[in-house]
Amino acid sequence: MNAKVSLVALEQYEDFPALMTALERALSPFGGMESLVHPGERVLLKANLLAPARPEEAVTTHPQVLRAVIRLVKAAGAAQILVGDGPGVGETEENMRVCGLLAVCQEEGAVPAPFRETATFHTPENTIGKSLELTAWLKQVDVVISLPKLKTHVQMGYTGALKNQYGLIPGGQKGEYHFRLQNRDRLADLMIDINRTARVKLAVLDAIVAMEGPGPHGGTPRKVGALVVGTDLAAVDVVGCELIGLPPGEYPLLQAARRSRFGATSLSEVDVAGDSLEALKVKDFQLVKTPVNVLRILPLPGFMLKWLRGQVAPTPFIQKEKCIRCGKCHRGCPAKPSAISPDSPEKGGVKKDLCIRCYCCHEFCPVKAITLKRPWLDRLLHWTALGEAGARLLGHLVAAFQPRSKKES
């Protein structure tokens, strides 16, 4: 059977009764919240608390979406509702205060849950993370619900339902995986492993106001006007990608999900309930140009591929006139010693031989002072455009050889 995803049009956050009605409508194909949360259960709402940003910046989970979910979870009889994340920038409580989630928790009776302590989770069927250190809250709750924000992402291209669970790794520990893996495809495999381990029961993807351009922090808010809801998180991301014009086959996490047979990874495997997907698509959404990992197909030794990747992948560059010298880029860099610093004598403040092109610094910068510079070899040979074309062709080939759904037949 195809995966089911609800798509409901919603113009704004300010009309809360309309938001509640939209969410209830989106949940109705799944039997309502009461079919997912049972009386007496403890529920963790995994928010997106990337950085201390105001709601109108479209960086974090919107407080009104959180409020609506809390009310439906309470109505289903939950014994306790926890709200948390392991942000890479700032502390959970401060981020919650700035983005408005702390006030909602206080008003609605939910408990803030900073992700500090970890527990070990063993999942033998995982690809990379057969043993993972994730937030210890996962062992103390019965249900996990993910509340992602639809945004672009300079490393992955897009961030939504699947990637939101990367925040189950507390704070700076995520940087350790960036340094250990140093490969976007392997990092995507890890994120699928985290999702398989966490067993998220529901995702409510906020695409009312999304982010376009150089996200997930440095982009621009863009109205899409939709909620995307589902129990299959890969399927939710398929619909999210389709909304903004990103072919799902080009998204690394959906590629990883397909490799791992984790959920529905193409539109032919998804039944969309609710409003028209075609009518809600944003035709001119500004996607981000990500460094496509085409070099892996070249018959070269690993050390040469690593060097060549450094010549074609974009490099962070500090714009000194915008920099406030907060040092978050330097402290958050996974490389040891750090590859970036406002005090570095290197051009753009970056030591290129140390930089692993994870773009955490771009994500951490609170004033958007870090840009990504395309190197000369990429500009000359157009590797990124070539990789995108190859990924698009591969996506079409995979879709062509998939069994057709009953709906199509």
Image: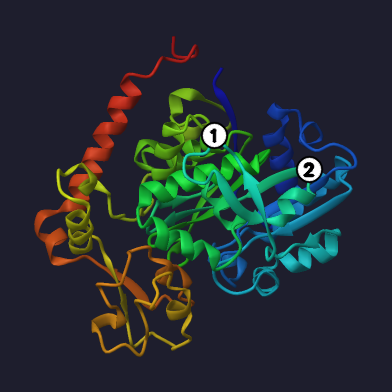
| The C terminus lies in quadrant | top left
Secondary structure under the numbered disc 2 in the rendered image: loop
Label disc, if present, on residue 142 of the rendered structure: 2
Gap between marks 1 and 2, in whole Å? Answer: 21 Å
> In front here: 282 or 109?
109
Residue 49 in view of the camera: yes
Q: Which residue type does callout 2 highlight?
A: Asp
For the point 21% across and 65% down, which residue is it? Answer: 374
> In front here: 118 or 96?
118
Where is 79 relative to 271, above or below? below
The residue pinned by badge 1 equals 125
Image location of residue 249, percent across then percent down: 36, 36
Q: Which residue type does callout 1 highlight?
A: Glu
Where is 263 relative to 390, above or below? above
Image location of residue 7, percent across then percent down: 58, 36
Image check: 261 left or right of 198?
Answer: left
At label 2, counting other C-alpha atoms closer than 10 Å, the crowd grade (few under 14, some 14-19, many 20 or more) is: some
Image check: 144 left or right of 340?
Answer: right
For the point 68% across and 66% down, which residue is it? Answer: 116
Where is 228 relative to 360, above or below? above
Label disc, if present, on residue 374 of the rendered structure: none
- Residue 354 occupies which quadrant of the picture? bottom left
Toward the top, the furthest residue is 409
Residue 15 in view of the camera: no
Secondary structure under the numbered disc 1 in the rendered image: loop
> In front here: 301 or 289?
301
